[in-house]
Image: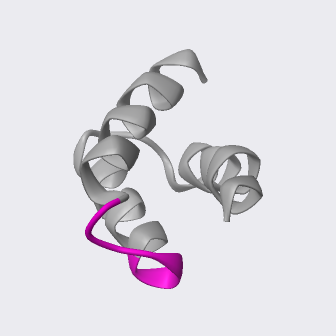
C-alpha cells in the first residue's frame, strides 16, 4: 500500500491543478493502473486519500 501512496501522491500533485472530481479520479486510476497496481489497491487509495480532500 505504501508504493501506491507514493506513486498516487506524485500523480495527484501532477493532475490537481488540471483536473477536478471525476476527471481527476479517472486520471489517477489510469496512471496507477499503467504503473502496474491492481484495481483494488487503486480504489482503496482513491477512497482514502482523494475523496476526503474534495
Name above or below for residue 25 compared with residue 38. below
Left or right placement of residue 51 versus residue 29 in this view: right
Q: Position of residue 39 (x, y in %)?
A: 52, 55
The residue shown at (67%, 65%) is 54
- Quadrant, the N terminus: top right
Instruction: Specify the farthest residue to the front.
Output: 17
Name above or below for residue 4 compared with residue 30. above
The residue shown at (31%, 62%) is 17
Name above or below for residue 32 compared with residue 47. above
Residue 21 is inside the magenta segment? yes
The residue shown at (39%, 80%) is 23
Segment tinted magenta in the rendering: 17-23
Residue 41 is inside the magenta segment? no
Q: Position of residue 38 (x, y in %)?
A: 48, 46
Q: Position of residue 43 (x, y in %)?
A: 63, 56
Name above or below for residue 7 compared with residue 49. above
Left or right placement of residue 21 versus residue 32 in this view: right
Left or right placement of residue 3 versus residue 7 in this view: right
Amino acid at each position: 500500500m505504501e508504493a501506491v501512496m507514493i506513486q498516487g501522491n506524485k500523480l495527484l500533485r501532477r493532475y490537481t491543478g488540471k483536473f477536478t472530481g471525476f476527471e481527476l479520479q479517472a486520471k489517477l486510476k489510469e496512471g496507477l493502473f499503467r504503473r502496474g497496481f491492481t484495481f483494488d489497491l487503486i480504489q482503496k487509495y482513491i477512497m482514502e486519500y482523494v475523496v476526503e480532500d474534495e
